[in-house]
Image: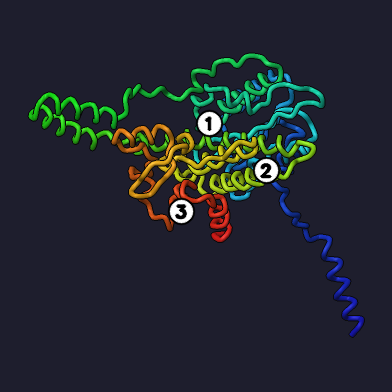
Amino acid sequence: MPARLAAALFAVLAFLPVVPAHAAAPEVPDRIAAAWRTDRLYVDDRLTVPDSELDRIRAAAKTAGFPVYIALVPQTPYLRKIQYDLPTLLQARTGQPGLYVVQVVSGDYWNGIEELYRPGGLKGKSLISVISADKQRLDLVNDRPAPQVVRTIQQAQTAYDGRPLPPIAAEDREPERPNRGSSVTDQEDRAAFIGLGAGGFIGFVLTLFLAFRRKRRPRRVGAEPNSYVTEIRRQADLGIRKAAHAISRLEAKPRLTLEQLDQRDDANRRLAAARALRADDPDGLLAVAGALLLSRQAQRAANGAKVPPPCFFDPTHNFGTTHVDWDGVEVPACKLCATRMAKGQAPRGLHVKSVPYWTLDPADSPLVATGFGALTDDLPERITGRLDDAR
């Protein structure tokens, strides 16, 4: 019997070496950093990017004057958790100074995360300040990667050595939309006033005309949902990066007072909630508006400024610095909305699928339930707690 067991064991041991080992796939940062050893432009195998796009990116990187590391990757659940930290994780693996650009695609929407690491002792403008001041970036198309990558390289050159930003290429601009002039609401108010002054018959005709036009020309949010959400999403992503930089600057101080520690903690909880919203619902208007608001609040907290509540009617407006009565409830409002209400006009609220967001079911979203934090100050905890429970 022992002889049979020994023979069986020997047979198993003899077989094991020929069984191929299945090592765990390297994590995304490790995979990208390894590929950069031979080519500083990494394209995920799951993506099909035209050669013309890659050629433009390579040409821009060659003229940068400093190393440029670029990764083009698809959005994944794993990446949503780390994407804002990915440039830092990648630079830690390479250990090299330079510009690190990660372009993430979700559907046909490309969004970039970037960091500029200078050699020790070399100073200049911060990349985030150059990006913030670059108004032309808002005109870039986002359905392909090259326009944003090329512009980011140009912005990094300005930050690196102060060279002026060139105008963006014509082919990289979004098509110009016709100038709408006054809003539909303002035009209707003006036309109604003229109709009343001109007489009953003309007023009747104008009323019919405006009623017809209202059906034909809905609000911008309803008429152009993709462009509107895209713009808010851009602002939210930039706000998240600016907030992260502000927190890093605060944490870099040698000794933080108790007040500064509280500011840091407040900024971090708001930033975490903003990132959670972007990761959980990257295309929803409620989520991107909430992420924009929270990132702005996080930046103010990290900078030691007072964090005011949002405008209840639209969190993408300026902060709510004035309180107004709304159906018997006192809510914070921005100057624009407060002024309109003082004139007896309706505030310009955030509409989701053509209805004011506050008419949605509050049980479905803490953003609705709290008026984006205008009614309570526990929005960050509600967001992160709800998402953790859902997972």
Residue at x 70%, y 41% (from the top left corner)? 260
Residue 72 appears in the rendering: no
Q: CA distance from mark 3 to mark 1?
A: 32 Å
Q: Which residue is mark 3?
A: 365
* First along the sequence among labels 3 and 2: 2
Of the residues shown, which amino acid type is indicated by label 3? Ser
| Residue 390 horizontal side relative to residue 7, left or right | left
How many C-alpha atoms fall within 10 Å of the one at disc 3: few (<14), some, or many (≥20)? some
Instruction: Name the residue located 23 percent from the left edge and 37 percent from the top edge.
Output: 215
Q: Residue at x 79, y 37 (%)?
A: 254
Res 132 quadrant in image: top right
Residue under pointer 1: 144
Q: Nearer the observer, disc 3 or disc 1?
A: 3
At label 2, the amino acid type is Arg
For discs 3 and 2, the disc positioned in front in the rendered view: 2
Q: Nearer the viewer, residue 351 or 51?
A: 351
The answer to whether one can see residue 223 in this image is yes
